[in-house]
Image (spheres, rainbow, N blue to C red):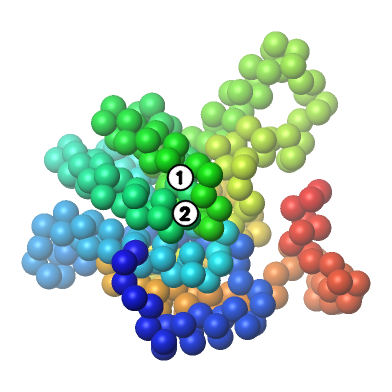
Amino acid sequence: MKRVQSSDDQKLQEKLKAKGNLPRHIAIIMDGNGRWAKKRGLPRVAGHSEGVKSVRDVVEACAQLGIEYLTLFAFSTENWRRPKEEVSTLMKLLLKTLKTETDELHKNNIRLRMIGDFETLPEEVQKQLREAIKKTENNTRLNLILALSYSGRWDILQATKKIADDVARKRIKTSEINEELFKRYLSTSQFPEPDLLIRTSGEMRVSNFLLWEIAYTELYVTETLWPDFRRKELYKAIEDYQKRERKFGLVSEQIKKIKGYGKNVFTLKQSK
């Protein structure tokens, strides 16, 4: 995050801000690192390394735009099934990135957070994550959430087990279980649901990511591979989002009426 922002980039950001409906929470499925490397006759790790540059640029742009939450799908529970050599390389790259980027995140008032099965990560990675999360815990500019050893099904299952345990211990009654209570048991309970989900590489699937949380999230798929996805691609996704009407199960006339009373349909949904 050391790059000097150009005047052209500032103008693009001001244009987006002027429209007044920036997404509060953006989630990204960062796909295409392997294909990017293969196209260039490089080992897969080269794609992952280049992808870190995209992470850095997108995080910086989101912070500058005033986005409050950015969730990056960095490593899924299914990714553990990949060849051991690749998994080991990915963990080493994660460890290196945490070591080199934490100070910069802190300087830029960015808070690092994590969702996923923390205990399945290598001990060195756990230690570095704890340190990075602790160091940045009071920062307020942007919440950067890394989804590591994470999947939507895993999160729903672990929430269900905790609820069942609390019912057995008579801490809650089955009659009290509703959407709001269930959400409190998810690893994402502290965050608002994503407004915009971006998937790179052109694949038309959500890959077990934030399955509960994206019920009403706007989806944006781009053919761009993650290592080529930089801030200008992010701006395209946000521009597309700003053209949409979010309905949350309502019809256009209802939304217009709500807005006419100075209310926000998204806020109403989140407060239920």
The image quadrant of residue 189 is top right
Residue 113 position in % (x across, y down): 47, 44
Q: Secondary structure at mark 1?
A: helix
| 83 shown above or below 15 | above
Front residue of this view, candidates 181 and 132: 132
> Where is mark 2, residue-wise?
110
Asked if residue 64 lies left or right of residue 92, the reply is right
The image quadrant of residue 217 is bottom right
Q: Label 1 is placed on what type of residue?
A: Thr
Residue beneath the point at 67% across and 39% down:
183
For marks 1 and 2, the one nearer the N-term is: 2
Residue beneath the point at 54% across and 29% down:
158
| 46 shown above or below 77 | below
Q: What is the crowding at mark 1: few (fewer than 14 residues within 10 Å), some, or many (at least 20)?
A: many
Residue 198 position in % (x across, y down): 47, 65
The number of numbered badges drawn on the structure is: 2
Residue beneath the point at 66% across and 24% down:
163
| 162 shown above or below 14 | above
Residue 63 position in % (x across, y down): 48, 64
Asked if residue 68 lies left or right of residue 251, the reply is left
- The circle on residue 136 is 1
Q: CA distance from mark 1 to mark 2?
A: 7 Å
Residue 46 position in % (x across, y down): 15, 59
Q: Secondary structure at mark 2?
A: strand
Q: Quick check: can you spot residue 92?
A: yes
Front residue of this view, candidates 257 and 92: 92
The answer to whether mark 1 and mark 2 are in CB contact below 8 A is yes
